Image (spheres, helix red, strand yellow):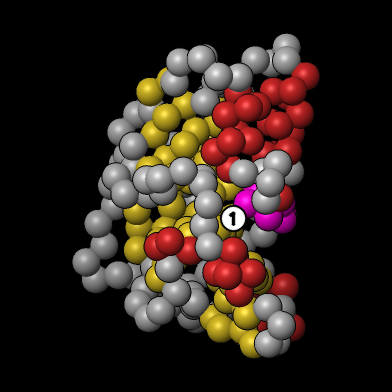
Amino acid sequence: MFSRRYLNALTVLLVAVLTLAFQQPVDGQKNNSTTTQPSNKQQSNPPKPTPTPRLEPFWQKVLRITGISVTPSALKGEDDTLTGDIWLAEVGKWQTRRLTYDGGYRSPLVLPSEQAVWALKGETIYDKSLEVGPARERYTIKGIVKLAAIGTEKPAQVLLLREDEAHQTIVELVSVADGKRTVLPYDQASKEDTRILNQLRE
């Protein structure tokens, strides 16, 4: 499980750029801000996911991987429809630091072991260091809607939700290191599977 010192010290604040008064353009003026793109941007498409065998119930596996039952904060729960820039706040010090300036990010997760934030922009996962430097594209996944939780197992993995063409929710794990994806199949008739799935969607 990740260091609680980092989890307690770091909180990502997702601020919708257009909702902040000091960031709103004056009426009649056009926002001329430009997006800074990494000069050596390398976008990659992670391999297609392989289903994992149903040797362990879906709900048990999710609880074990994310540590939800032990550490509820391991599960994201804020509104993932908001988009904006990523801010870092130190709990207890009332100090914030802006990590991005090009906007459009949503569903951020702090990865303490990587000293980085993962966030979505469109269907692409971006990796932003907690230090200096631009956000860089990591993996593009069709239908991705949310980065839901940080895995507690090693190597580091992130649990995500995506939708297929029939708008059915698919739960996957994606490797931080190489983008390898694993589907976690669930039973729609199972009350426990449904409960955990609804938790992940919230």
Image quadrant where residue 7 sits: bottom right
Image coords of residue 89 (percent x, y): 62, 78
Q: In the shown orientation, is residue 164 left or right of residue 40?
A: right
Tell me, yes or no, if residue 122 can be seen here: yes
Q: Does residue 16 sit above or below 61 in this rendering?
A: below
Give the residue displayed 70% in from the left and 41% down from the top: 69
Count of picture labels: 1
Helix, strand or loop at label 1? It is strand
Give the residue displayed 48% in from the left and 64% down from the top: 112
Image coords of residue 146 (percent x, y): 58, 45
Tell me, yes or no, if residue 161 can be seen here: no
Image coords of residue 49 (percent x, y): 38, 28
| Disc 1 packing (10 Å; few <14; some 14–19; many ≥20) | many
Q: Residue 180: within the magenta?
A: no
Q: Does residue 170 sit above or below 21 in this rendering?
A: above
Q: Nearer the viewer, residue 13 or 55?
A: 55
What range is drawn magenta here? 73-79
Q: Does residue 131 sit above or below 149 in this rendering?
A: below
Q: Nearer the viewer, residue 20 or 8?
A: 8
Give the residue displayed 67% in from the left and 51% down from the top: 71
Q: Nearer the viewer, residue 28 or 86?
A: 86
Give the residue displayed 26% in from the left and 62% down from the top: 41
Determine the main secondary structure of the stretch shown in magenta: loop
Q: What amino acid type is highlighted by mark number 1?
A: Ser
Query: Residue at label 1?
Result: 107
Image coords of residue 24 (percent x, y): 68, 81
Dividing the image into 4 quarters, which one contains the C terminus?
A: top right
Q: Nearer the viewer, residue 5 or 196?
A: 5
Furthest-top residue in this view: 189
